[in-house]
Image (cartoon, helix red, strand yellow):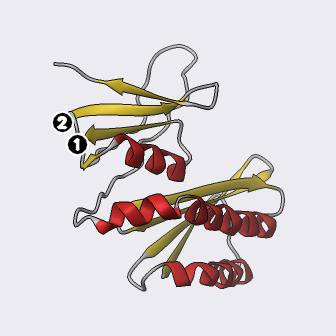
Amino acid sequence: MKIIITSKNLNASENLKETIEKKFEKLDKYFSSDIAANIMLSKERDKKKIEATINAAGTIFRAEEISDDIYESVDKIIDKLSSQMSRFKTKLVKKHKSPKGVIFEAVPEYEEPDEDIKVVKTKKFQLEPMNVDEAVVQMELLQHTFFVFLNMETDSVNVVYRRQDGNYGLLETVY
């Protein structure tokens, strides 16, 4: 696995970069050598944030952690990613038995503006067919509260979302 480390508002030391690479070696057994792990290090106020995104065979694994100690956050990120792989192992194995790989980019979460609506970022992604169960798995792996996908059963754009009661909802579009 290739590890790509970028920093924003934070000067990452060589020791930190080596630690990240060493810790992510634990995940090497799960991925082929052509898979890339994108690690973003940033500073927000007095806290340090680490985000990890791994796009593997059309499935996106993502975790983030904010704390005072960036080294502790690296350990927590590894635990979160390992937990995701274990938790969704059965569903992912079923998904990748089919010849179609689903490649999706994350839908960004926007913060609610106080006054005027201002779109500060636009993201485009390719809609690929998947069923509702696969969409829920992908949403959970991305740690988002919703996920936009092309429903292969109805051939329409749908959104799955996590409800406040912990269950899932489905929004179906009609033309």
Residue placed most toward the observer, 63 or 3: 63
Q: Amino acid at mark 1?
A: Met
The residue lying at 71 percent from left, 81 percent from top is 19
Residue 88 in the image: state x and y as whole percent. 53, 58
Badge 2: few (under 14), some or many (20 or more) residues near its Cα, within 10 Å? few
Give the percent coordinates (x, y) of residue 44: 71, 48
Q: Residue 111, relative to residue 19: is it above or below?
A: above
- Contact? badges 1 and 2 (CB < 8 Å): yes
Q: Nearer the viewer, residue 141 or 13?
A: 141
SS at circle 1: loop
- In the rendered image of this protein, does residue 67 appear above or below residue 115? below
Q: Position of residue 13 (x, y in %)?
A: 71, 77
Q: What residue is shown at x 24% (from left), y 45% (from top)?
A: 127
The span from disc 1 to disc 2 (Cα, nearest Å) is 5 Å
Residue 7, can we see it?
no
Q: Quick one: which residue is furthest to the top in this view?
A: 115
In the picture, measured across the screen, residue 68 lies left or right of residue 107, that is: right
Query: Which mark is drawn over residue 152?
Result: 1
Residue 29, quarter of the rendered image: bottom right
Nearest the viewer among 94 and 151 is 94
Identify the mark at residue 119; answer none if there is no mark. none
Which corner quadrant holds the C terminus? top left
Q: Quadrant of residue 165?
A: top right
Identified at 44% across, 74% down, the residue is 36
Secondary element under disc 2, as helix, strand or loop, is: loop
* In the image: residue 147, left or right of residue 9: left
- How far across and how far down the image is residue 166, in percent? 62, 31
Tell me the residue that label 2 is attached to.
Answer: 155
Answer above or below: position of 119 versus 56. Answer: above
Residue type at the position of mark 2? Asp
